[in-house]
Image (spheres, helix red, strand yellow):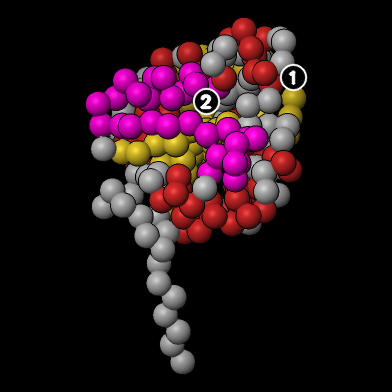
């Protein structure tokens, strides 16, 4: 079984407004619900405000893949939590960063860049698959529309990607590297759609991509461990 932890800052959906209407159980609750239907996955959730930000050593040790959604509370995640998460990713844990998690402390550390991008008005997004044989694209059409979605656009300050799988395009011609992997011990996948004001995580193709990404980023052995430090002179 793949042990998945879905982490969410869980701020927007606690306030009155569209995010709460669309995701009454929180974005983490929505994602955990569709992943839980997969027979090879066991899913737990963790949110900001819980002890150790919900990500204690024990939780991380029992996590094969960590899914992360954050937006307005990146700075409230403690540096100790970031260190723990990074250590587990370096040891093989999979990590999936969703939407505005591009600016999370963890993702920026993994990338080693600012992860800044162009932010524009909400628009109609076409998600184009540019690696149709990649496992994360399995069962996903060559292109599909999310309307509306928040426009994130190039330039996107990320390191060289291992695999570019999806490119988002918008009506004004803007594009974004919207779905890609990098490797830092564990496998990492970033996926750009998922603004809190829209039902993006109810979209069947988005759900398929995240489900596929969990299987792809899961460490092969099913267990991750800290890579031993070996000093050579
Ligand atoms: Zn957003």
Q: Quadrant of residue 104?
A: top right
User: What span is in magenta?
Assistant: 27-55
Residue at (26% x, 37% y) in the render: 1
Q: Secondary structure at mark 1?
A: strand
Query: Quick one: which residue is furthest to the top in this view?
Result: 21
Q: What is the number of the mark on residue 156?
A: none
Residue nearest the observer in this picture, 118 or 23: 23
Residue at (48% x, 19% y) in the render: 30
Q: Judge from the rendering whether residue 21 lies leftward or rightward of residue 139; answer left or right.
A: right
Q: What is the number of the mark on residue 28?
A: 2
Q: Judge from the rendering whether residue 233 lies leftward or rightward of residue 171; answer left or right.
A: left
Q: Which residue is mark 1?
A: 121
Query: Residue 70 appears at what percent x and percent y?
Result: 63, 33
Badge 2 density bin: few <14, some 14–19, many ≥20, Cα 10 Å: many
- Mark sitting earlier along the chain (2/1): 2
Q: Is residue 155 above or below residue 161?
A: above
Q: Judge from the rendering whether residue 19 lies leftward or rightward of residue 190; answer left or right.
A: right
């Amino acid at each position: 079984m793949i042990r998945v932890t879905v982490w969410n800052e869980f701020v927007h959906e606690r306030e009155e407004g569209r995010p709460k209407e669309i995701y009454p159980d929180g974005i983490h609750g929505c994602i955990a619900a569709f992943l839980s239907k997969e027979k090879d996955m066991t899913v737990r959730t963790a949110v900001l405000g819980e002890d150790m930000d919900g990500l204690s050593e024990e939780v991380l040790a029992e996590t094969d893949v960590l899914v992360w959604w954050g937006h307005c509370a990146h700075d409230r995640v403690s540096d100790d939590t970031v260190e723990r998460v990074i250590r587990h990713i370096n040891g093989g844990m999979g990590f999936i960063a969703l939407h505005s998690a591009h600016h999370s402390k963890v993702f920026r550390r993994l990338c080693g860049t600012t992860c800044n991008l162009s932010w524009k008005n909400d628009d109609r997004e076409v998600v184009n698959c540019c690696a149709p044989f990649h496992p994360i694209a399995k069962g996903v059409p060559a292109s599909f529309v999310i309307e509306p979605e928040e426009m994130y656009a190039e330039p996107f300050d990320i390191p060289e990607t291992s695999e570019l799988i999806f490119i988002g395009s918008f009506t004004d011609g803007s594009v974004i590297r919207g779905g890609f992997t990098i490797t830092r011990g564990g496998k990492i996948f970033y996926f750009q759609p998922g603004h809190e004001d829209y039902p993006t995580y109810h979209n069947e193709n988005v759900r398929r991509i995240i489900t596929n990404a969990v299987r792809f980023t899961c460490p092969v052995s099913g267990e991750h461990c800290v890579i031993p430090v070996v000093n050579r002179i």
